[in-house]
Image (cartoon, helix red, strand yellow):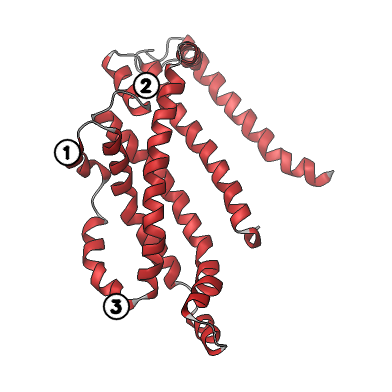
Amino acid sequence: MDKENHSSKPIIISIISLTLFLGIWELVCRGGLIDPVFMPAPSKIFARAVKLIGNGELMAHTLASTRRVMVGFMISSMVAIPFGIFLGSSRLFMAICDPFISLLRPLPSMSWIPLSLLWLGITETQKYSIVFMGSFAPSLLYIIEATKSIDPLLIRAARNLGASKLDVMREVILPGALPQIISGLKVMLGIAWTCIISAELVAAREGLGFMIMNGKEYFQTDTVMLGMVMISITVMVIDVVFKKFERRLLPWTR
């Protein structure tokens, strides 16, 4: 019982803190201390959310952005994980690929938007490519470093005991590197959201980025704020799902 009470205290404190913040924000806005054009009250944002939920726009924009993020991120991860483990395990191929990785790594996702529009037009494939290009190189570096962090003594011990290269990869490198790889991918998921919002702000017909930009064009600050809130909520939900997946995949890290 004491443990349950102890674990529930931070949640209660967080709820009280959020409620106080929203209450103060509402009072300041209702008191006329802030121009609603620049900062609408929480009640106005909530009213806008109810309206957009009613006509289906909010869910459509949220699902569009989520789909683009997850498809681009999954493709990026599927390429980066095996390639990163391979490069992290081979000095020769790492030396060959390192110049190209160093060239790609500093490029922000925004820099790929003009080229992707020229190559692919305003299509879903273009949105997926922005997420891929924005998250691939950093993900690859996380995975390479995670693979390199494995203690060489463990690898030598496994080989001395007769383990093949495949056995070493499956029994030593993967279990040792996976916790860091998963942690890196969680960070990259947030960056993937930055990538897609940047792409939708420039060229899109739907999505949370489009909703934010459209709200800005019509001076609907409540729509802009609602889009920002929906990004945060969606990322938090995905993060909870990601953590559950991590616990199932890596039960020894609990």
* Residue hosting label 1: 114
* Residue hosting label 3: 92
Crowd around label 3: few <14 · some 14–19 · many ≥20 (10 Å): few
* Residue hosting label 2: 224
Q: Quadrant of residue 88?
A: bottom left
Kind of residue sitting beneath label 2: Val
Q: Secondary structure at mark 3?
A: helix
Q: Position of residue 74 (x, y in %)?
A: 42, 47
Question: Distance between the Cα atoms at labels 3 and 2?
Answer: 49 Å
Q: Secondary structure at mark 2?
A: helix
**Residue visible at 51% across and 77% down in the picture:** 168
Q: Position of residue 64 (x, y in %)?
A: 39, 29
92 relative to 69 in the view: left or right: left
Crowd around label 2: few <14 · some 14–19 · many ≥20 (10 Å): many
26 relative to 104 in the view: left or right: right
Q: Position of residue 149 (x, y in %)?
A: 46, 72
Q: Position of residue 15 (x, y in %)?
A: 63, 30
In this rendering, which labeled residue sits more in front, label 3 or label 2?
3
Image quadrant containing the N terminus: top right
Q: Residue furthest bottom?
A: 160
Q: Residue furthest right?
A: 1
Q: Nearer the viewer, residue 216 or 114?
A: 114
Question: Distance between the Cα atoms at labels 3 and 1?
Answer: 34 Å
Crowd around label 1: few <14 · some 14–19 · many ≥20 (10 Å): few
